[in-house]
Image (cartoon, rainbow, N blue to C red):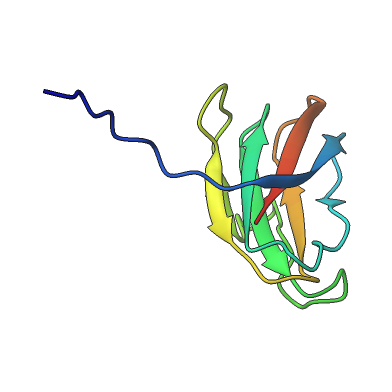
Amino acid sequence: MANFQLKQSSSYPIRYQVLQYNSATVFSTNFGSETNQIRIMAQLAGWGTINQSTADSIIASSAGGTGLIIPAMTSGGEYLTVRPGQIFTFTSTSTSTGACTVTEMS
């Protein structure tokens, strides 16, 4: 009798971006043409949004808690479905500095 092991779902990482937070909203570059999903990991808790450009009317804001909540984490990450060409924005109420990583997945 053979043993079978279930495999965890996965995606292929295409590109990694590190957004260095220093008390101001930070923006990723536009996602590539094959990007369907991103994984977000942040050293600081904050808010994030998916946008078409930096000129969009809804940008992550610590003032009103605008956007989805991104917890500070050491493993796992938040997975979000996106479209090619979009960007990710991140902000926090923290006065500390830290990194927020964006991994583009196909």
Q: Nearer the viewer, residue 90 or 61?
A: 90
Q: Horizontal placement of 56 versus 103: left or right?
A: right
Q: Quadrant of residue 21?
A: top right
Dividing the image into 4 quarters, which one contains the N terminus? Answer: top left
| Image vertical order of residue 100 relative to residue 27, above or below | above
Q: Quadrant of residue 81?
A: bottom right
Q: Nearer the viewer, residue 37 or 40?
A: 37
- Residue depicted at x 28% and y 28%: 5
Q: Residue furthest left?
A: 1
| Image vertical order of residue 37 relative to residue 7, above or below | below
Numbered-mark total: 0
Q: Position of residue 15 (x, y in %)?
A: 80, 46
Dividing the image into 4 quarters, which one contains the C terminus? Answer: bottom right
Q: Position of residue 11 (x, y in %)?
A: 57, 48
- Residue depicted at x 72% and y 32%: 94
Q: Quadrant of residue 59?
A: bottom right
Q: Position of residue 67 (x, y in %)?
A: 60, 60
Q: Horizontal placement of 24 versus 67: left or right?
A: right
Q: Nearer the viewer, residue 92 or 104?
A: 104
- Residue depicted at x 81% and y 62%: 32
- Residue depicted at x 73% and y 64%: 34
Q: Position of residue 74 (x, y in %)?
A: 57, 21
